[in-house]
Amino acid sequence: MNVETNTIALKANAKIANGRETGTLGKAMDVLEIIASSPTPLRFTDLLALSNQPRGTLHRQVTNLIDEGLLSVGRDQTYELGLRLLKFASKAWSRNRFREIAEPIIRKLHEATGETVHLGVLNGSEVIYLDKVESRQTVRMYSQIGNASPTYCTGVGKAALSTLEDAKVRAVLERVKFKKYTTTTLDNVEAVLNELTDIRRDGVSFDREEHEPGIHCVAAPIASRDGLLAAGVSVTAPTFRVPMSQLKEWSSLVRETAKELSDAVDARLSPRS
Amino acid sequence: MNVETNTIALKANAKIANGRETGTLGKAMDVLEIIASSPTPLRFTDLLALSNQPRGTLHRQVTNLIDEGLLSVGRDQTYELGLRLLKFASKAWSRNRFREIAEPIIRKLHEATGETVHLGVLNGSEVIYLDKVESRQTVRMYSQIGNASPTYCTGVGKAALSTLEDAKVRAVLERVKFKKYTTTTLDNVEAVLNELTDIRRDGVSFDREEHEPGIHCVAAPIASRDGLLAAGVSVTAPTFRVPMSQLKEWSSLVRETAKELSDAVDARLSPRS
DNA sequence: TCACAAATTCCATTATTTGGAACACGATTT
DNA sequence: AAATCGTGTTCCAAATAATGGAATTTGTGA
C-alpha cells in the first residue's frame, strides 16, 4: 500500500497543466463526468448536446461504457452511473492507507469538538472527501464520502491549496469556473491566492458560509514532506449553533490535528518503512 | 432517475454471453480489475505478468489511467485505485432509485429480526451490495456496500440467479471460475442449477456457510416485472448465535420483504409513472 | 395511419493503439 | 569504481480501432 491518495492530485494537476492526452479513455471518462455532474437525468440527445461528439461516436462510447458496467440505462432511456463503479470505489476506499492511518486521529478531533469532522484530499481541481466522523449516525453512508467539492469555497479545499506553491495553485484553478454559491464565495483566482497567504501564515482556513449558507467550518492543511499529499481536515458546524468565535477557539486544536496527521503520514507512508 | 440498477446486469451478461468488444476502454478496465482484485499491491512488473499485454502497451494504459485519476501510484511504485472512482461511486450510489426505495423496507426487516440485512443486485456474474442495515454501527462505511461477491455461494447471489431462466444462468456462470471457499460451497454450474430449482419453488435461498465458515443467511429473490432487475435481500447471522432453525423461521418474513421490494420497484420505477 | 423525433447502425476515412526493441535509472554485486 | 540485474520508460512503423456523416430503424404523438 502507499500514499496513493495524492499522486493523483499531482498527476491530475499535471494533466490540467499540460493537457496531457489520455486518448479514448479520456473521452469515455468525459462522458461519465458529464453524467456524474448533471443534476438531472440525461437522455441520449441531452448527452449529445453536452458532449461535443458526433452522434455515431457518442453512441459507441456510451455502448462501450454500458457493456463495461460503468454506465447503465433505464427504462426511460436516461443514463446513470453503473454499479461497477461501486465495486471499484469500495476497494479504493478500503485499501486507502492514508484514510486508515487518519481515522483514529480525526475521531479524536470529533470527540474533542462534538461536531462533524471531515477529511478531504486534493484531487485535480477538486477536493474529495475520504472520511467523515459525526455524532448523528442517522446520516447515510456515502453521504459525504467520495463527494467532490470545489477547492475555492471549502475549508478543506483552501487548506489543501495552501500547501501548494502559488504557481501550482494557479495551474489548478486555471480551468475552474468559479460559481458564487453564496455572497461570501470567493469567485476568482486572485481572491483565493490572497486568502491563501493568510492561511499559510495562520495554519488554518475558514469557510465562512462560502459553500452553503448557514454552514461554516475551520480547517487545517495536511501535507507530506515529499509533497505528494495535499489534504485537509475540518470541523464543520451550523452557524445557528456554533458561532465563529467558537470555530476560532478550535483553531489550534484543528491545527494540531493536522500536524499530527502530516507526521503520521511521513512516519508511516514514507518510501521504505 | 431509473432502474439503472440492473440494466447493467443484463448488458453485462450480454457481454459475457456474446463477448462483445469494448475496445480500448475494455482493456483499460481489465487493468483496473486486475488491481482491484489483487489481494496484494502490484508493481508494474506484477501487473505485466497478470495482464497479457506487451510492456509498452501496458505502460501507456497505466499512464492514461493515472492521468485520468482512476489509478494512482505510490512511493513504493505500487498501484492502487484512484480517488476519482470514489467520486463516481458516490454519485452512482446516491442517485440509485432502487436503493432509495428499498431502504425503509429493508430497515423494517432489520428491526423484525435484529440481524444484519443486505440488499444486493446482480451485476454481470457477481452480486454487488447496494445497502446494508445492521445494529452495530461500529462497522465502517463502504465496509460492505459496493462489495462484489460471487453469486454461487451467497444467499443474495443465488436468490438473484433464481430470477433468471436456466439458459441465462448458464451464460452468466459460464466464465466464472468456482472457488471452494468452504466445504459446503457449490463448485459447479449443475449444482447451482439444481439448487435454483428448490429456490424457485420455495421462494427463499440459504447460504449454509458456503462463503465464510460460521456465517449463514436466508435470502429471497427480487425481480421487476420487466425482468430488468435481478436482486436479492438477505438476513445474515453467525451460526453460533442464530441456528438454522431460526433462519428457516424467518423465511416467510424475508420472502414477504422481497415481494414488497419487487412490488415497490414495479410501482415506482415503471416506464411512465 | 402518418409524420416527426429520437435512437441506432453502417462503413470508408482517419487517428490511435500496438508491441518489439532500444534506452534510462537505481540498487546490488564484483 | 565498474559491471550487472531488475525495473521502469520511451520510440516508431505496422496494425487496429475510433471517427463521423449519412442512412436506417424505432418509438411517439397527432
Image: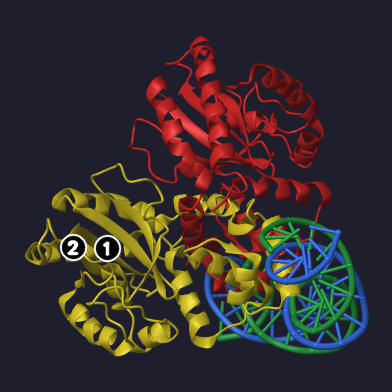
Chain colours: A yellow, B red, C blue, D green
The reply, left or right, for residue A108 in relation to residue B47 is left
- Neighbours of disc 2 within 10 Å: few (<14), some (14-19), many (20+): many
Q: Give the residue drawn at x 46%, y 56%.
A: B90
Instruction: Examine the image and state in which quarter residue A229 appears.
Output: bottom left
Q: Which of B71 and B112 is in front in this view?
A: B112
Give the secondary structure at mark 1. strand
Instruction: Examine the image and state in which quarter residue B109 appears.
Output: top left
Q: Nearer the viewer, residue B207 or B185?
A: B207
Question: Which x, y percent locates residue A252?
Answer: 12, 65
Q: Mark 2 — residue?
A: A254
Indicate the chain on which mark 1 is placed: A
- Decide if residue B106 is in sight here: yes
Dividing the image into 4 quarters, which one contains the C terminus of chain A? Answer: bottom left
Q: Is residue A197 above or below residue A46?
A: below
- Going by the numbered disc 1, the residue's amino acid type is Val
Q: Give the residue drawn at x 54%, y 54%.
A: B1
Marks 1 and 2 close (CB-CB < 8 Å): yes
